[in-house]
Image (tube, rainbow, N blue to C red):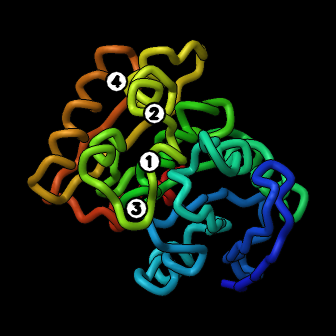
Amino acid sequence: MDWIYVQMQSESARTPLPLDILVPDRRFPGPYKTVFLLHDMAGNNTSWMRHTNIEERLAETGAVLVMPSCLNSFYVNMYYGYDMLDYMTKELVQLCEGWFRLDQRRESRLVAGLGMGGYGAVRAALAAPEVFGTAVSLDGFLDPGRFYQEKLAAVKMEDVMGPEGYFRRSPNNLWVAARGLAYNVKPEIVLISSAKDAFRNEAEALYTAMTEWGISACLKTDEEKGLDFLAEKVRAM
């Protein structure tokens, strides 16, 4: 795969942001599937390439891999800060379609993330189901509200999500976003949780709620290897 590094001025986020992109080799003429890979807390656009073998796993899928840096924003339009959700669901998608010969069908776009990025992937797909056909959360922090009490060194939740009461009522609460999804077309949500702890409980609870509300959801546990399952989803797109 060809590796492209971009340093761009985001109009949505109103700040310079780096971006790494892996493009299929010349055997794949396009149009290409697109996979957006979202980093974890305190990570950046290099995290997926430094900490996983994602290039090796997805090299034969014919997909463009887009790895943005969204700081510690949880990929939302921050209460105080940057409009990262608009950057992810609008600006970045449009830019990539202008740069590459991409398949513009929603079924050919997948967004996936680790930890904070797992939350961001689900948030993006629920906010823009007409853009992303599938979201894959790998051990995602699906209920960031827990961090109002369990303080994070890297993130002040009040700056990102606003006061806790405001967050609980807003679409940044994934339960609110899922229940209020008004689109006729709904995304497929894949929740992969390998740890048997509170984060697993959040995944199970969100899965149950989504299936009750008519959203196509899938729950995978440690019996499935997360990156292997992600690769299978991309190949099947």
Q: Which residue is mark 4?
A: 210
Three-letter code, disc 2: Pro
Distance of label 4 from label 1 (alpha carbons): 25 Å
Q: List x then y, in percent, for residue 55.
A: 53, 80
> Which quarter of the rendered picture does the N terminus lie within?
bottom right
Question: Which element carries disc 4, helix, strand or loop?
Answer: helix
- Tag on residue 163? 2
Closer to the camera: disc 2 or disc 3? Answer: 2
Structural distance between the alpha carbons of marks 2 and 4? 25 Å
| Disc 1 to disc 2, C-alpha distance | 8 Å
Position of residue 150 measured from the top left corner of the image (x, y, whole percent)? 24, 52
Give the left or right position of residue 179, taking residue 6 as reference: left
Check disc 1: other Cα within 10 Å, few if <14, some if 14-19, many if 20+: many
Mark-to-mark CA distance, 3 and 4? 20 Å
Residue 180 picture location, percent across and down? 49, 15
Q: Quadrant of residue 127?
A: top right
Residue furthest right as drawn: 98
* Comparing labels 2 and 4, the label whose residue is closer to the camera: 2
Mark 1 or 2, nearer chain start: 1
Left or right: 14 in relation to 210: right
Rendered residue at 52%/82% (across/down): 49
Is residue 227 positioned above or below 91 on the image? below
- Where is mark 1, residue-wise? 157
Q: Nearer the viewer, mark 4 or mark 1?
A: 1
Query: First in sequence: mark 2 or mark 3?
Result: 3
The amino acid type found where label 4 is placed reads Met
Q: CA distance from mark 2 to mark 3?
A: 25 Å
The residue carrying mark 3 is 114
Residue mark closest to the camera, 1 vs 3: 1
Could you tell which of marks 3 and 4 lies nearer the N-terminus?
Answer: 3
Query: What residue appears at the point 63 percent right and 67 percent down from the top-left corner?
Result: 69
**Tag 3 or tag 1, which sits nearer the N-term?**
3
